[in-house]
Amino acid sequence: MSAAPFGRRALTVASVEQVGAYHLLELADPDGPEPRAGQFAMLACTEEWGGGQDERPFLPRAISIARHRGGRAQFLLEAVGPGSARLCAVKEGESVWALGPLGNGFTAPAEGRSPILVGGGVGIAPLMILQDQLAGACTVLLGFRGSNHAAGAGLLTGAQVATDDGSAGHHGTVTEMLERELAGDRKAEVYACGPAGMLESVRALCERSGTPVQLALEAPMACGFGACYGCVVPRRGGGYLRVCVEGPVISGSELAAVDEHAGAPA
Amino acid sequence: MSIDFCGLKLAHPVINGSGTFDAIAAGDVFGSALRESFPFAAYVSKTITVKARAGNPPPRLWETGAGMINSIGLPNKGVDAYMRDDLPRLTGLRCAEVQDGGPPAPVPVITNVMGSTVQEISHLLGACDAAPEIEAIELNVSCPNVKTGLDIGADPAQLREVVQAVRPLTAKPLIVKLTPNTADVSLCARAAQDAGADAVSLINTLRAMALAPADGATPRTRWLGGGTGGLSGPAIRAVALAQVAAVAGAVGIPVIGMGGVQSAAHARDLLDAGATLVAVGTESFRDPAVGTRIARGLCTP
C-alpha cells in the first residue's frame, strides 16, 4: 500500500448516479494510489463549499472509498447535513477536493475463517470495495430503513437484506440475521460498518460468541491525518483512539463499547 | 525571503500553529518524502505538559460558519516521553522549496509547553533547555492557575510574575503565546515583554461553545465533551488582525500573527499589521500542503 499524496488534489466528477436514497459519486483519480478496503478520503467541493445551512460546510467530509477501478474512485453518499447535501448536489464535470486514501483498512480474515460482511445504511460503502478485494465467497448481510434505501443492496453481490419497516427482505434488524449466521457458523470473521447502535450490537454479539470482528467507525474529523485529535473514541482499558489514523477500521477487541457518535448516519 | 527570527534562520515567514500539524503522524500517513519538503519554515509542537494527558472526552469538534470549535484538551504523552520518543523524529526536517536556488533549509523545532504552576513551567523549560534539538520554546499561558482558576495569560500582573520567574531558566528564545480571552491583549503582550519574553504569538482560539441539538430535554446539554472549546478558522480572521495590530504597536519584540489565515493575502495582512512570522492552523486541516502555497504566494509580488 503506497502513501497518500501530500496535499489535496482537485478531481473531476466523472458521474453521479442515484441509487435509491443514495448518490454514487464517481471521481476521476488517475494519480491516486490503490486504496485498501476500509480507507477513506476527505472530500470538499472546490466551489460553493460554505454558504449553505448555518453558513456551512467548512471542513471537508470523511467519506469511505466505496470502489476504486480503472483510475476512478467511487463514494456512496446520503444527504444528511450541509456537507453531504452539497456533495450529493455535484454535477458531472465539477471538481471535488480529495485528500487520501487515508486510515487503516480491513485486514484479510484469519486462516480458516470465512468473512461475514454486515452493513447498515450508507455504511455499506466500504463493504463494496471489501467484497471486490476479498474476491471469494462471503456472506453479506445489509440493513436499511426501508425499500428506497434497500436499493443500495444491489451494489453488492448476493446480499441478504433486512429493513426496519419490512418493505424489503427480513422485517427486523441486520443484527438478528447476524445472530442466526453466527449460531450456525463458529468459524467466521465479521466486518461491519453502519450506525453506532448497529455497530455496538454487532460488537457485543461477536464478543459473546468469540468471533473476531473488524468495525469501520465514523467520526466528524477536521483533518483526517492525525493532526487535530478531534475524532477520538474511547479505547478499552483507557485513553482514546483517533479514528483517522488508528482507525477507521478498529478491532472489536480494542473497544469496550462503540461510542454513540462513532457510526455512520442512521 | 529568508527571515531572522530571534536568531533562528527561517526559509520563509510561514510556520504552523501549535497543535494543528503533527509532523510524526503526517510522516506516517504521507510518507517520508514529507521530511524533505516540509510545508512550514519552523515546526511548532503541540502543547507538552509535565504529565501525560488523555485529552477531553468526545465529542471534541463542532463545525461553525467559516470555522470550527475544538475541545481537544491538550492530549500529549508528557515531557519525558516527548523528549525520548518524539523529539528524535522531529529533527532533520527540511523545508519545501518556495523559491529557486539553494539547498533545502533546515526546519527548527519550537516546543510548546504548558504548566499550571511556576514549578511545572520551570520543569518544562529546564527540560527544553537541556535538549539541543529544541531551538526555541513557546509558552502556552492559556492554562488556569491552580490557585486562582484564572488563565495565567489573561491577567497582565500574573503573566508578568510567571514569565519573570521562569525566564532565567533558558537562554533559548522564549515565545509567549498570548490568549485572546482577556480584556486588553496589548497589556498582556507588554507584560510578557517586560518580563523578558523574546517574542509573542497570537491569537490563540477564542472561547466558544455549542449546545447539543434541541431534543426537548431541559436543560440543554453542551455538545462538546469539554463543555467549552476554542473557535478558529476564517471566522476569527478579522479579530486576529485587530489584535496583532494592537500588540505590534505596543511591543518592540517580534510578533507571530495567526488566526484564520487561508491564503498569501491573509498572511500579507498580518505581516503588514506588524507580524514578523505568520502561523497557519485550521487551514492546514483542510489542506496539509497549504503552508508551502502561502509561502510561495508571499514570494510572488
Image (spheres, coloured by chain):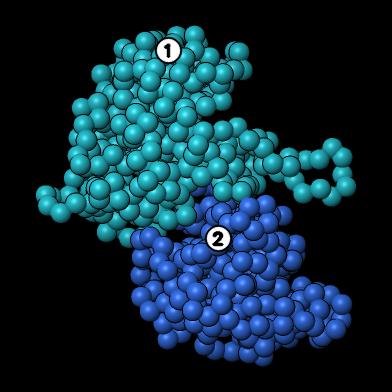
Chain colours: A blue, B cyan
Residue A32 visible, this orientation: yes
Q: On what subunit does the disc labeled 2 rest?
A: A
- Determine the image quadrant of residue A155: bottom right
- SS class, disc 2: loop
Q: Residue at x 33, y 23 (%)?
A: B199
User: Which quadrant: the N terminus of chain A?
Assistant: bottom left
Q: On what subunit does the disc labeled 1 rest?
A: B
- Specify whether B221 is left or right of A191: right
Q: Which residue is mark 2?
A: A49
- Specify whether A195 is left or right of B240: right
Q: Hey, which residue is sitting farthest left in the picture?
A: B102
Q: Residue at x 41, y 14 (%)?
A: B190
Instruction: Name the foreground residue: A255 vs B13.
Output: B13
Q: Label 2 neighbourhood size at 10 Å, few (<14), some (14-19), many (20+)?
A: many
Counting from the top left corner in percent of width and height, residue A132 is at: 53, 85
In the figure, B155 relative to A85: above or below?
A: above
- SS class, disc 1: helix
Residue B80 visible, this orientation: no
In the figure, B299 relative to A200: above or below?
A: above
In the figure, A16 relative to B231: above or below?
A: below
- Determine the image quadrant of residue A100: bottom left
Q: Which residue is mark 1?
A: B191
Amino acid type at image mark 1: Ala
Q: Residue at x 61, y 48 (%)?
A: B65
Q: Do circles 1 and 2 both sit on a common chain?
A: no
Report, in whole angstroms, how far the alpha carbon at label 1 lies from the one at label 2: 41 Å
